[in-house]
Image (spheres, rainbow, N blue to C red):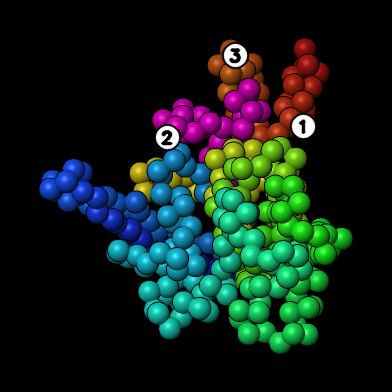
């Protein structure tokens, strides 16, 4: 598949003054990050707080500029100032708190805000807003007041606002962190639909392991570096390694790990409840 984005030895550093008058210290939030994402992939980036995953996300649409190395979006270097506007059209960003992204008092006006800023024609804006709301399953709320929606609905409206600008990639920085289970499910169902049906490239930053189970690829970050990369079946069975980075694994993978430690011969790469049920049924049929 065609490459959507690529980072090469990406670094991001900032300075902190430990105490007044003390020596200034340089802190690296990213150090030597080299990854490639193909068009249409669903990528999940995992890592504990401070691992660099959110900093990486902000480099994708040039909200941050590299201290070293480079980030490329469809062949455009994010360090090129004359390309930043085009890059942000290619890669839309969704943040953790949907309330911070609401700018209008009516849903359809909020979704239209981005396309209007891009200078799109009114006819095209109306069409884009309609299609974006349909894509996230929120068409019937187009005349609603955003503040009266649930957290999951607000986040879907935020996603629609980005979709209306017709990006080719969406980057989501822990979009489900502030939602209840129902809201999280609504948002994840929307993301999977966009990826599978519209072939949208998705880069999803999260700390919920179950949201990564169906990803095409997982990138694990720690102290600003990529420490693991692979499919869910390649990454999650490495239970002890993930624990060393302060991460859990999906519940069924954890159960498989404990069963194997107890001598029960189940596959190490079980990810879902159905896979666990099937594995246990096969074991029972052999007895």
User: N-terminal of the two: label 2 or label 1?
Assistant: 2
Above or below 141: residue 246: above
Q: CA distance from mark 2 to mark 1?
A: 28 Å
Q: Is residue 168 above or below residue 147?
A: below
Rendered residue at 76%/68% (across/down): 108
Q: In the rendered structure, are the residues bearing label 2 and label 1 in contact, judged by CB atoms less than 8 Å apart? A: no
**126 displayed left or right of 217:** right
Q: Position of residue 5 (x, y in %)?
A: 50, 67
Q: Dots 3 and 2: beta carbons under 8 Å?
A: no
Mark 2, residue position: 245
Q: Quadrant of residue 207?
A: top right
Q: Earlier in the sequence, mark 1 or mark 3?
A: 3
Name the spot of residue 11 as percent of width and height, x first: 32, 59
Q: Nearer the viewer, residue 8 or 18?
A: 18
* 6 up-or-down from 176: above or below: below
Q: CA distance from mark 3 to mark 2?
A: 26 Å
Residue 193 found in image quarter:
bottom right
- In the rendered image, the residue lying farthest to the bottom is 121
Q: Is residue 172 visible?
A: no
Q: Secondary structure at mark 2?
A: loop
Please give the residue where the numbered disc 1 appears in the rendered image. Answer: 274
Can you identify the residue that label 3 sits on?
263
Between the C-alphas of marks 1 and 3, the distance is: 21 Å
Q: Position of residue 194 (x, y in %)?
A: 72, 60
């Amino acid at each position: 598949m065609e490459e959507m984005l690529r980072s090469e030895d990406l670094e991001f550093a900032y300075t902190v003054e430990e105490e007044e008058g003390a020596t200034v210290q340089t802190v690296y939030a990213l150090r030597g990050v080299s990854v490639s994402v193909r068009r249409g992939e669903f990528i999940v980036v995992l890592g504990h707080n401070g691992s660099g995953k959110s900093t990486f996300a902000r480099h994708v649409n040039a909200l941050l500029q590299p201290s070293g190395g480079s980030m490329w979006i469809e062949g455009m270097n994010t360090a090129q100032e004359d390309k930043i506007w085009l890059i942000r059209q290619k890669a839309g960003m969704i943040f953790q708190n949907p309330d911070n992204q609401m700018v209008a008092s009516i849903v359809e006006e909020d979704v239209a805000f981005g396309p209007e800023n891009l200078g799109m024609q009114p006819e095209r804006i109306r069409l884009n807003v309609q299609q974006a709301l349909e894509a996230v399953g929120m068409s019937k709320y187009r005349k609603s007041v955003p503040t009266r929606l649930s957290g999951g609905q607000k986040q879907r409206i935020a996603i629609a606002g980005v979709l209306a600008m017709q990006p080719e990639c969406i980057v989501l920085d822990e979009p489900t962190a502030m939602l209840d289970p129902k809201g999280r499910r609504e948002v994840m169902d929307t993301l999977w639909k966009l990826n599978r049906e519209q072939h949208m490239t998705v880069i999803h930053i999260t700390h919920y392991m179950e949201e990564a189970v169906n990803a095409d690829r997982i990138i694990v970050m720690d102290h600003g570096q990529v420490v693991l990369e692979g499919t869910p079946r390649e990454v999650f069975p490495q239970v002890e390694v993930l624990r060393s980075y302060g991460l859990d694994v999906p519940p069924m993978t954890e159960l498989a790990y404990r069963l194997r430690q107890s001598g029960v011969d189940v596959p190490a790469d079980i990810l879902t409840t159905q896979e666990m049920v099937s594995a246990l049924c096969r074991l029972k049929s052999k007895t």
